[in-house]
Amino acid sequence: MPASFPLPRATGGRRALAAVAALPLLAVVLTSCGYGSDADSDKNDKANVAAGAKKIEGLDEVKIGYFPNLTHATALVGDQEGLFQKELGATKAKYTQFNAGPSEIEALNSKSIDIGWIGPSPAINGYTKSQGKNLRIIGGSASGGVKLVVNPDKIKSLDDVKGKKIATPQLGNTQDVAFLNWIAEKGWKVDAESGKGDVSVVRTDNKITPDAYKSGSIDGAWVPEPTASKLVAEGGKVILDEADLWPDKKFVITNIIVSQSFLKEHPKVVEAVLRGSVKTNDWIKANPDKAKASANAALKEASGKELPAKVIDPAWKSIQTTDDPLAATLDSEAKHAVKAGLLDKPNLKGIYDLKPLNKVLKAEGEPAVDDAGLGVK
Protein backbone atom coordinates (compact mmCIF):
# COMPACT_ATOMS: atom_id res chain seq x y z
CA MET A 1 0.00 0.00 0.00
CA PRO A 2 1.33 3.49 -0.74
CA ALA A 3 2.13 5.47 2.35
CA SER A 4 3.17 9.05 2.94
CA PHE A 5 6.66 9.74 4.19
CA PRO A 6 6.82 13.47 4.77
CA LEU A 7 9.90 15.59 4.69
CA PRO A 8 10.41 17.92 7.65
CA ARG A 9 7.23 19.94 7.83
CA ALA A 10 7.20 23.28 6.14
CA THR A 11 6.43 26.40 8.13
CA GLY A 12 2.82 27.46 8.58
CA GLY A 13 1.61 23.87 8.90
CA ARG A 14 1.99 23.03 5.24
CA ARG A 15 2.11 19.38 4.41
CA ALA A 16 5.49 18.15 3.26
CA LEU A 17 6.29 16.11 0.21
CA ALA A 18 5.00 12.56 0.50
CA ALA A 19 6.56 9.34 -0.45
CA VAL A 20 6.45 7.32 -3.51
CA ALA A 21 7.39 8.33 -7.02
CA ALA A 22 6.97 5.07 -8.74
CA LEU A 23 4.17 3.58 -6.73
CA PRO A 24 3.85 -0.21 -6.67
CA LEU A 25 1.45 -1.46 -9.24
CA LEU A 26 1.07 -4.98 -7.94
CA ALA A 27 0.61 -5.72 -4.26
CA VAL A 28 3.37 -7.46 -2.35
CA VAL A 29 2.58 -8.74 1.11
CA LEU A 30 5.08 -7.50 3.68
CA THR A 31 6.63 -10.32 5.62
CA SER A 32 7.89 -10.61 9.15
CA CYS A 33 11.27 -9.23 8.16
CA GLY A 34 9.64 -5.86 8.79
CA TYR A 35 10.32 -4.09 5.52
CA GLY A 36 9.64 -6.13 2.42
CA SER A 37 9.43 -9.61 0.98
CA ASP A 38 12.53 -11.59 0.09
CA ALA A 39 12.75 -12.41 -3.59
CA ASP A 40 14.11 -15.78 -4.71
CA SER A 41 17.71 -14.70 -4.95
CA ASP A 42 18.92 -18.26 -5.58
CA LYS A 43 17.12 -18.84 -8.86
CA ASN A 44 19.93 -17.57 -11.09
CA ASP A 45 22.98 -17.42 -8.85
CA LYS A 46 24.55 -20.79 -9.56
CA ALA A 47 24.16 -20.45 -13.31
CA ASN A 48 25.89 -17.08 -13.38
CA VAL A 49 28.71 -17.49 -10.86
CA ALA A 50 31.78 -18.59 -12.77
CA ALA A 51 33.85 -21.42 -11.40
CA GLY A 52 36.52 -20.03 -9.14
CA ALA A 53 34.78 -16.65 -8.81
CA LYS A 54 35.80 -14.68 -5.75
CA LYS A 55 33.91 -12.46 -3.37
CA ILE A 56 34.36 -8.78 -4.13
CA GLU A 57 36.17 -7.08 -1.27
CA GLY A 58 35.58 -10.29 0.69
CA LEU A 59 31.88 -9.42 1.07
CA ASP A 60 29.49 -12.37 1.48
CA GLU A 61 26.40 -10.59 0.15
CA VAL A 62 24.98 -7.30 -1.04
CA LYS A 63 21.37 -6.54 -0.12
CA ILE A 64 19.39 -4.98 -2.96
CA GLY A 65 15.86 -3.55 -2.78
CA TYR A 66 13.35 -2.72 -5.50
CA PHE A 67 9.62 -2.65 -6.29
CA PRO A 68 7.86 -5.33 -8.37
CA ASN A 69 6.90 -2.55 -10.74
CA LEU A 70 7.46 -1.92 -14.46
CA THR A 71 9.17 1.39 -13.71
CA HIS A 72 11.77 -0.74 -11.87
CA ALA A 73 12.35 -2.80 -15.03
CA THR A 74 16.15 -2.73 -14.68
CA ALA A 75 16.00 -4.35 -11.25
CA LEU A 76 13.22 -6.77 -12.27
CA VAL A 77 15.09 -8.00 -15.33
CA GLY A 78 18.54 -7.86 -13.75
CA ASP A 79 17.31 -10.07 -10.91
CA GLN A 80 15.26 -12.38 -13.13
CA GLU A 81 18.09 -12.93 -15.62
CA GLY A 82 20.90 -13.12 -13.05
CA LEU A 83 22.73 -10.19 -14.63
CA PHE A 84 23.66 -8.52 -11.36
CA GLN A 85 24.89 -11.78 -9.88
CA LYS A 86 27.10 -12.31 -12.90
CA GLU A 87 28.95 -9.06 -12.13
CA LEU A 88 29.13 -9.77 -8.41
CA GLY A 89 30.98 -13.06 -8.74
CA ALA A 90 30.82 -15.00 -5.47
CA THR A 91 29.35 -12.06 -3.55
CA LYS A 92 25.71 -13.07 -3.29
CA ALA A 93 22.97 -10.71 -4.46
CA LYS A 94 20.17 -10.86 -1.90
CA TYR A 95 16.98 -9.19 -3.10
CA THR A 96 14.12 -7.71 -1.11
CA GLN A 97 10.97 -6.38 -2.76
CA PHE A 98 9.07 -3.39 -1.38
CA ASN A 99 5.67 -1.91 -2.07
CA ALA A 100 6.26 1.59 -0.68
CA GLY A 101 9.12 4.07 -0.69
CA PRO A 102 9.11 4.73 3.07
CA SER A 103 9.68 1.04 3.81
CA GLU A 104 12.65 0.95 1.47
CA ILE A 105 14.16 4.10 2.95
CA GLU A 106 13.69 2.69 6.45
CA ALA A 107 15.41 -0.51 5.35
CA LEU A 108 18.31 1.47 3.91
CA ASN A 109 18.59 3.49 7.13
CA SER A 110 18.67 0.32 9.24
CA LYS A 111 21.14 -1.42 6.87
CA SER A 112 18.59 -4.08 5.99
CA ILE A 113 19.43 -3.20 2.39
CA ASP A 114 22.55 -1.59 0.94
CA ILE A 115 21.40 -0.47 -2.50
CA GLY A 116 17.90 0.23 -3.82
CA TRP A 117 15.83 1.20 -6.83
CA ILE A 118 13.42 3.95 -5.82
CA GLY A 119 11.52 6.99 -7.08
CA PRO A 120 12.66 10.61 -6.77
CA SER A 121 10.28 11.68 -4.00
CA PRO A 122 11.42 9.12 -1.41
CA ALA A 123 15.03 9.70 -2.44
CA ILE A 124 14.59 13.42 -1.71
CA ASN A 125 12.79 12.56 1.51
CA GLY A 126 15.44 10.19 2.73
CA TYR A 127 18.26 12.56 1.92
CA THR A 128 16.61 15.59 3.49
CA LYS A 129 15.38 13.87 6.64
CA SER A 130 18.89 12.59 7.35
CA GLN A 131 20.29 16.09 6.67
CA GLY A 132 22.26 14.68 3.77
CA LYS A 133 23.99 12.02 5.84
CA ASN A 134 22.44 8.73 4.79
CA LEU A 135 21.93 8.09 1.10
CA ARG A 136 23.31 9.08 -2.27
CA ILE A 137 21.73 8.72 -5.69
CA ILE A 138 24.32 6.84 -7.73
CA GLY A 139 22.52 6.25 -11.01
CA GLY A 140 19.40 6.44 -13.08
CA SER A 141 17.11 3.62 -14.06
CA ALA A 142 13.92 4.76 -15.81
CA SER A 143 12.19 7.69 -17.43
CA GLY A 144 8.59 8.23 -18.47
CA GLY A 145 5.61 5.97 -18.09
CA VAL A 146 3.19 8.56 -16.64
CA LYS A 147 -0.02 9.61 -18.40
CA LEU A 148 -3.25 11.54 -17.95
CA VAL A 149 -6.01 9.10 -18.90
CA VAL A 150 -9.60 10.37 -19.02
CA ASN A 151 -13.16 9.29 -19.73
CA PRO A 152 -13.57 10.39 -23.37
CA ASP A 153 -17.31 10.86 -22.91
CA LYS A 154 -16.71 13.52 -20.25
CA ILE A 155 -13.39 15.06 -21.32
CA LYS A 156 -12.74 15.88 -24.97
CA SER A 157 -9.79 18.23 -24.56
CA LEU A 158 -7.29 19.31 -21.92
CA ASP A 159 -9.39 22.37 -21.15
CA ASP A 160 -12.26 20.04 -20.23
CA VAL A 161 -10.24 18.76 -17.25
CA LYS A 162 -11.36 21.89 -15.37
CA GLY A 163 -14.24 21.02 -13.06
CA LYS A 164 -13.60 17.28 -13.26
CA LYS A 165 -12.46 14.68 -10.71
CA ILE A 166 -8.97 13.44 -11.48
CA ALA A 167 -7.12 10.83 -9.42
CA THR A 168 -3.46 10.87 -8.46
CA PRO A 169 -1.79 8.09 -6.46
CA GLN A 170 -1.09 9.98 -3.24
CA LEU A 171 -0.81 13.46 -1.74
CA GLY A 172 2.64 14.81 -2.54
CA ASN A 173 3.88 11.84 -4.54
CA THR A 174 5.66 12.51 -7.82
CA GLN A 175 2.57 12.20 -10.01
CA ASP A 176 0.50 14.32 -7.62
CA VAL A 177 3.09 17.10 -7.68
CA ALA A 178 3.34 16.92 -11.48
CA PHE A 179 -0.43 17.23 -11.86
CA LEU A 180 -0.64 20.13 -9.40
CA ASN A 181 2.12 21.89 -11.33
CA TRP A 182 0.32 21.32 -14.63
CA ILE A 183 -2.90 22.70 -13.11
CA ALA A 184 -1.06 25.82 -11.93
CA GLU A 185 0.45 26.35 -15.37
CA LYS A 186 -3.07 26.20 -16.83
CA GLY A 187 -3.91 29.13 -14.54
CA TRP A 188 -6.33 27.11 -12.44
CA LYS A 189 -6.43 27.12 -8.64
CA VAL A 190 -6.43 24.05 -6.41
CA ASP A 191 -5.71 23.77 -2.70
CA ALA A 192 -2.85 21.27 -2.66
CA GLU A 193 -3.74 19.62 0.63
CA SER A 194 -7.47 19.17 0.18
CA GLY A 195 -7.37 18.75 -3.59
CA LYS A 196 -10.34 21.10 -3.91
CA GLY A 197 -10.59 23.86 -6.47
CA ASP A 198 -10.95 24.31 -10.21
CA VAL A 199 -10.11 20.61 -10.52
CA SER A 200 -10.95 18.02 -7.86
CA VAL A 201 -7.73 16.08 -7.19
CA VAL A 202 -8.72 12.71 -5.72
CA ARG A 203 -5.87 10.82 -4.08
CA THR A 204 -6.47 7.15 -4.84
CA ASP A 205 -4.32 4.04 -4.49
CA ASN A 206 -3.26 2.78 -7.92
CA LYS A 207 -4.77 -0.63 -7.22
CA ILE A 208 -8.17 1.02 -6.66
CA THR A 209 -8.04 3.56 -9.48
CA PRO A 210 -9.34 1.27 -12.28
CA ASP A 211 -12.39 0.34 -10.18
CA ALA A 212 -12.94 3.99 -9.28
CA TYR A 213 -12.85 4.81 -12.99
CA LYS A 214 -15.31 2.04 -13.87
CA SER A 215 -17.72 3.19 -11.15
CA GLY A 216 -17.62 6.78 -12.41
CA SER A 217 -16.34 8.19 -9.12
CA ILE A 218 -13.42 9.73 -11.02
CA ASP A 219 -13.30 11.18 -14.51
CA GLY A 220 -9.66 10.37 -15.14
CA ALA A 221 -6.26 9.91 -13.53
CA TRP A 222 -2.67 11.16 -13.74
CA VAL A 223 -0.92 7.86 -13.07
CA PRO A 224 2.14 5.72 -13.82
CA GLU A 225 2.19 2.54 -15.84
CA PRO A 226 0.71 0.02 -15.95
CA THR A 227 -2.23 1.72 -14.19
CA ALA A 228 -2.57 4.08 -17.16
CA SER A 229 -2.84 1.18 -19.60
CA LYS A 230 -5.29 -0.59 -17.29
CA LEU A 231 -7.52 2.48 -17.55
CA VAL A 232 -7.19 2.49 -21.33
CA ALA A 233 -8.25 -1.16 -21.33
CA GLU A 234 -11.38 -0.02 -19.48
CA GLY A 235 -12.21 2.50 -22.20
CA GLY A 236 -10.12 5.45 -21.07
CA LYS A 237 -8.16 7.67 -23.43
CA VAL A 238 -4.66 9.04 -23.02
CA ILE A 239 -5.07 12.79 -23.37
CA LEU A 240 -1.56 13.74 -22.20
CA ASP A 241 1.74 11.92 -21.80
CA GLU A 242 3.81 13.63 -19.09
CA ALA A 243 6.94 13.05 -21.17
CA ASP A 244 5.63 15.72 -23.58
CA LEU A 245 6.01 18.32 -20.81
CA TRP A 246 9.75 17.72 -20.31
CA PRO A 247 12.83 18.68 -22.36
CA ASP A 248 13.74 15.83 -24.70
CA LYS A 249 10.65 14.05 -23.31
CA LYS A 250 12.72 12.65 -20.43
CA PHE A 251 12.16 12.85 -16.68
CA VAL A 252 13.28 10.69 -13.80
CA ILE A 253 10.86 8.10 -12.48
CA THR A 254 13.34 5.67 -10.87
CA ASN A 255 16.82 6.18 -9.36
CA ILE A 256 19.44 3.92 -7.80
CA ILE A 257 20.39 4.83 -4.23
CA VAL A 258 23.02 3.52 -1.82
CA SER A 259 23.76 4.13 1.83
CA GLN A 260 26.75 6.41 2.20
CA SER A 261 28.40 4.02 4.66
CA PHE A 262 28.14 1.09 2.23
CA LEU A 263 29.49 3.20 -0.62
CA LYS A 264 32.48 4.19 1.50
CA GLU A 265 33.17 0.67 2.77
CA HIS A 266 32.49 -1.31 -0.43
CA PRO A 267 33.09 0.86 -3.50
CA LYS A 268 33.97 -2.10 -5.75
CA VAL A 269 30.74 -3.89 -4.86
CA VAL A 270 28.81 -0.72 -5.71
CA GLU A 271 30.65 -0.55 -9.03
CA ALA A 272 29.73 -4.18 -9.74
CA VAL A 273 26.03 -3.50 -9.12
CA LEU A 274 26.19 -0.41 -11.32
CA ARG A 275 27.96 -2.40 -14.02
CA GLY A 276 25.15 -4.95 -13.77
CA SER A 277 22.61 -2.14 -14.13
CA VAL A 278 24.33 -0.70 -17.21
CA LYS A 279 24.58 -4.12 -18.82
CA THR A 280 20.97 -4.94 -17.94
CA ASN A 281 19.80 -1.71 -19.56
CA ASP A 282 21.83 -2.58 -22.66
CA TRP A 283 20.27 -6.05 -22.72
CA ILE A 284 16.77 -4.60 -22.34
CA LYS A 285 17.35 -2.25 -25.29
CA ALA A 286 18.83 -5.00 -27.44
CA ASN A 287 16.13 -7.54 -26.54
CA PRO A 288 12.92 -5.57 -25.87
CA ASP A 289 10.50 -8.48 -26.31
CA LYS A 290 12.58 -10.89 -24.23
CA ALA A 291 13.03 -8.19 -21.59
CA LYS A 292 9.29 -7.50 -21.47
CA ALA A 293 8.61 -11.21 -21.03
CA SER A 294 11.28 -11.41 -18.34
CA ALA A 295 9.78 -8.47 -16.45
CA ASN A 296 6.31 -9.99 -16.71
CA ALA A 297 7.62 -13.33 -15.43
CA ALA A 298 9.14 -11.52 -12.46
CA LEU A 299 5.84 -9.76 -11.78
CA LYS A 300 4.04 -13.09 -11.90
CA GLU A 301 6.46 -14.52 -9.36
CA ALA A 302 5.84 -11.54 -7.10
CA SER A 303 2.04 -11.46 -7.34
CA GLY A 304 0.98 -14.76 -8.81
CA LYS A 305 -0.44 -12.96 -11.83
CA GLU A 306 1.13 -11.64 -15.01
CA LEU A 307 -0.08 -8.57 -16.88
CA PRO A 308 -2.18 -9.22 -20.01
CA ALA A 309 -0.76 -8.17 -23.37
CA LYS A 310 -3.26 -5.32 -23.74
CA VAL A 311 -1.80 -3.76 -20.59
CA ILE A 312 1.89 -4.62 -20.63
CA ASP A 313 2.48 -3.92 -24.33
CA PRO A 314 1.60 -0.19 -24.28
CA ALA A 315 2.96 0.24 -20.75
CA TRP A 316 6.34 -1.24 -21.68
CA LYS A 317 6.69 1.02 -24.72
CA SER A 318 6.22 4.18 -22.65
CA ILE A 319 8.99 3.44 -20.13
CA GLN A 320 12.62 4.04 -21.10
CA THR A 321 15.41 2.47 -19.11
CA THR A 322 18.37 4.80 -18.68
CA ASP A 323 21.70 5.01 -16.89
CA ASP A 324 21.36 8.78 -16.68
CA PRO A 325 19.69 9.90 -13.42
CA LEU A 326 18.33 12.97 -15.25
CA ALA A 327 19.38 15.07 -12.27
CA ALA A 328 18.02 18.35 -13.60
CA THR A 329 14.52 16.88 -13.70
CA LEU A 330 14.73 15.72 -10.08
CA ASP A 331 15.65 19.28 -9.13
CA SER A 332 12.66 20.52 -11.14
CA GLU A 333 10.34 18.05 -9.43
CA ALA A 334 11.47 19.35 -6.03
CA LYS A 335 10.84 22.93 -7.19
CA HIS A 336 7.36 21.96 -8.36
CA ALA A 337 6.59 20.63 -4.87
CA VAL A 338 7.82 23.88 -3.34
CA LYS A 339 5.67 25.84 -5.80
CA ALA A 340 2.63 23.74 -4.87
CA GLY A 341 3.16 24.55 -1.20
CA LEU A 342 3.95 20.96 -0.24
CA LEU A 343 7.62 21.45 0.54
CA ASP A 344 10.06 24.02 1.86
CA LYS A 345 13.00 24.50 -0.44
CA PRO A 346 15.32 21.54 0.22
CA ASN A 347 19.10 21.62 0.06
CA LEU A 348 19.90 18.88 -2.45
CA LYS A 349 23.59 19.63 -2.77
CA GLY A 350 25.43 16.36 -2.47
CA ILE A 351 22.46 14.09 -3.14
CA TYR A 352 24.31 12.61 -6.14
CA ASP A 353 27.59 10.74 -6.34
CA LEU A 354 27.97 9.73 -9.96
CA LYS A 355 31.70 9.05 -9.90
CA PRO A 356 31.27 5.24 -9.63
CA LEU A 357 28.72 5.20 -12.46
CA ASN A 358 30.85 7.38 -14.71
CA LYS A 359 33.81 5.07 -14.07
CA VAL A 360 31.67 2.12 -15.20
CA LEU A 361 30.34 4.02 -18.22
CA LYS A 362 33.86 4.99 -19.29
CA ALA A 363 34.95 1.36 -19.13
CA GLU A 364 31.95 0.43 -21.28
CA GLY A 365 32.76 3.13 -23.82
CA GLU A 366 29.72 5.20 -22.89
CA PRO A 367 29.56 8.97 -22.22
CA ALA A 368 29.53 10.32 -18.69
CA VAL A 369 26.31 11.55 -17.05
CA ASP A 370 25.81 14.83 -15.22
CA ASP A 371 24.65 15.64 -11.67
CA ALA A 372 23.22 19.10 -12.51
CA GLY A 373 25.43 20.67 -9.87
CA LEU A 374 23.93 18.53 -7.11
CA GLY A 375 26.83 16.13 -6.68
CA VAL A 376 29.33 15.62 -3.90
CA LYS A 377 32.40 17.80 -4.09
Image (cartoon, helix red, strand yellow):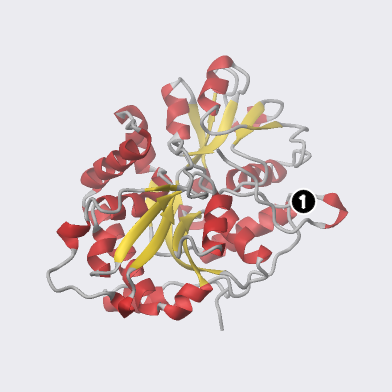
**Observer-nearest of 57 and 281:** 57
Going by the numbered disc 1, the residue's amino acid type is Gly
The crowd level at tag 1 (other Cα within 10 Å; few <14, some 14-19, many 20+) is many
Q: On the image, which quarter does residue 202 sit in?
A: top right
Task: Identify the residue at the far bottom of this view.
Answer: 377
Name the residue that disc number 1 marks: 341
Image x and y of residue 276, in percent = 30, 65
**Observer-nearest of 364 and 271:** 271
Image x and y of residue 346, in percent = 70, 65
**Observer-nearest of 60 and 24:** 60
Q: Residue at x 76, y 48 (%)?
A: 15
Judge whether 167 appears above or below 24 on screen: above
Image x and y of residue 256, in percent = 45, 62
Q: Is residue 346 left or right of residue 103?
A: right
Residue 353: tell me if it is visible: no
Per the image, label 1 sits on a secondary structure element best described as loop
Q: Residue at x 43, y 31 (%)?
A: 229
Q: Is residue 132 left or right of residue 136?
A: right
Residue 181: tell me if it is visible: yes
Task: Identify the residue at the far left of this view.
Answer: 51
Q: On the image, which quarter does residue 120 sit in?
A: bottom right
Quadrant housing the C terminus:
bottom right
Task: Identify the residue at the far right of this view.
Answer: 12
Q: Residue at x 66, y 49 (%)?
A: 18
Q: On the image, which quarter does residue 2 sit in?
A: top right
